[in-house]
Amino acid sequence: MSKIFFTITGTKYYFGQSFLEPGMQVKLRKEPENEHDKEAIRVEFPGLGKIGYVANSTWTVLGESMSAGRMYDSFKKKAYGTVEIITPGGVICSLNKKKKKL
């Protein structure tokens, strides 16, 4: 199975992305009650809470990343991601269905 990539977007509305580094783990939680996007997936970081969302627009999905809508049915309520690349336009992560042991 090949890696699934996703982009974290909207970090500027929370804590920015300057604290993120490749290899760090983030938690993904479905947010079906989101009034703007029924396929919203929020991205959380331990100790901070919500740091952004999985990109779900052609304007915010970077490179070979999947949109939140395409990823939505690939896990139940939560999953995890590993930060791979940090760009000015967003953070690219790989999807992990289970928490990696650090």
Image: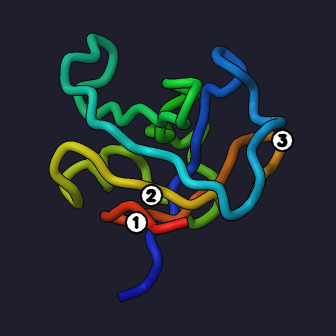
Residue sitting nearer the eye, 65 or 74: 74
Q: Position of residue 97 (x, y in %)?
A: 31, 64
Q: Position of residue 56 (x, y in %)?
A: 44, 39
- Badge 1 density bin: few <14, some 14–19, many ≥20, Cα 10 Å: some
- Helix, strand, or loop for circle 3? loop
The quarter of the picture where residue 51 lies is top right
Q: Quadrant of the C terminus?
A: bottom right
Of labels 3 and 1, earlier in sequence is 3
- Badge 3 density bin: few <14, some 14–19, many ≥20, Cα 10 Å: few
* Spatial CA span between label 2 and label 3: 18 Å
In the image, what residue occupies the spot 67% across and 64% down?
A: 23
Report which residue position mark 3 lands on: 88
- Kind of residue at disc 1: Asn
Q: Quadrant of the N terminus?
A: bottom left
Report which residue position mark 2 lands on: 66
* Spatial CA span between label 3 and label 1: 23 Å
- Helix, strand, or loop for circle 1? strand
Q: Position of residue 76 (x, y in %)?
A: 16, 50
Q: Is residue 29 left or right of residue 77?
A: right
- Kind of residue at disc 2: Met
Q: Which mark is residue 96?
A: 1
* Spatial CA span between label 2 and label 1: 14 Å
- Helix, strand, or loop for circle 2? loop
- Badge 2 density bin: few <14, some 14–19, many ≥20, Cα 10 Å: many
Of labels 2 and 3, earlier in sequence is 2
- Kind of residue at disc 3: Pro
Q: Is residue 21 left or right of residue 49?
A: right
State which mark lies toward you, 3 or 1. 1
State which mark lies toward you, 2 or 1. 1
Answer whether labels 3 and 1 touch (C-beta < 8 Å): no
Q: Is residue 15 above or below residue 57?
A: above
Q: Is residue 94 above or below residue 30?
A: below
